[in-house]
Image (cartoon, grey):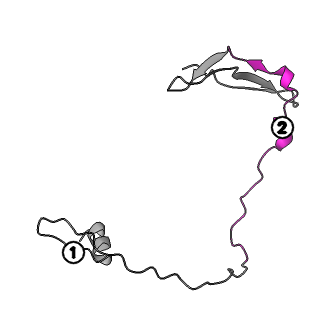
Amino acid sequence: MGGLSKALRRINARELADGSFTQGERPVFQPKRPQGAKPPAVGKGKAAAGGSGGGASDMQETSAADREYWSNETITTTDGAFTWIVKPIKRVKLTSGKSFRFADPTP
C-alpha cells in the first residue's frame, strides 16, 4: 500500500469503487504538552585537523579606488519594467601586494 493511501486512511477517507478516495474528516487536533527547555549538553564534534591557512588579512583590499572594472553591462528585468547599468569588478588589489581577478561576466 502506498504512502498516500495510508495517509488518506489516517484521516478516515474511504476508498471508492473507481479507486479514488472520499475526503473524510480530519481527527481533532491534540496539542502536545509543553516539554520545557532542552537540557544543556557538551558538544561532541571533532575539531578540523590543521589550520585554515591564511588569515583575513590576506584578502584585504587596498582601496576601492584601485579597482579595475569590466565594461558596463545593462541588466533588464524579464518583464522589461526595470533596467539598470552595472560596472562588474575585474580586478581588486590586495594589501599583500597580490591581486584578485574576477572572470569576465559576459555570457
- Closer to the chain start, of discs 2 and 1, is 1
36 in relation to 80, above or below: below
Location of residue 71 (image quadrant): top right
Q: Quadrant of the N terminus?
A: bottom left
- Tell me the quarter of the picture where residue 10 sits: bottom left
Crowd around label 1: few <14 · some 14–19 · many ≥20 (10 Å): some
Depth check, mark 2 against mark 1: the one in front is 1
Report the disc number at residue 14.
Answer: 1
Q: Which residues are magenta?
A: 42-71
Q: Secondary structure at mark 1?
A: loop
Cα distance in 3D space between marks 2 and 1: 67 Å
Which residue lies most toward the left here? 17
- Amino acid type at circle 1 is Arg
In the image, residue 90 sits, relative to residue 51, either above or below, namely above
**Residue 101: x, y in percent?**
72, 24
Indicate the amino acid at tag 2.
Asp
Q: Quadrant of the C terminus?
A: top right
- In the image, taking residue 19 as reference, residue 100 lies left or right, namely right
Residue at 73 percent across and 79 percent down: it is 40
Query: Residue at point 59% right, 22% down?
Result: 75
Circle 2 — which element? helix
Q: Residue at x 36, y 75 (%)?
A: 26
Q: Residue at x 69, y 80 (%)?
A: 37
Closer to us: 51 or 61: 61
Is residue 45 positioned above or below 35 on the image?
A: above
Q: Position of residue 20 (x, y in %)?
A: 19, 65
The secondary structure that dominates the magenta segment is: loop
Crowd rating for badge 2 (residues with CA inside 10 Å; few <14, some 14–19, many 20+): few
Where is residue 23? Give x, y as percent.
27, 69
Q: Is residue 81 magenta?
A: no
The residue that label 2 is drawn on is 58
Left or right of 12 on screen, residue 96: right
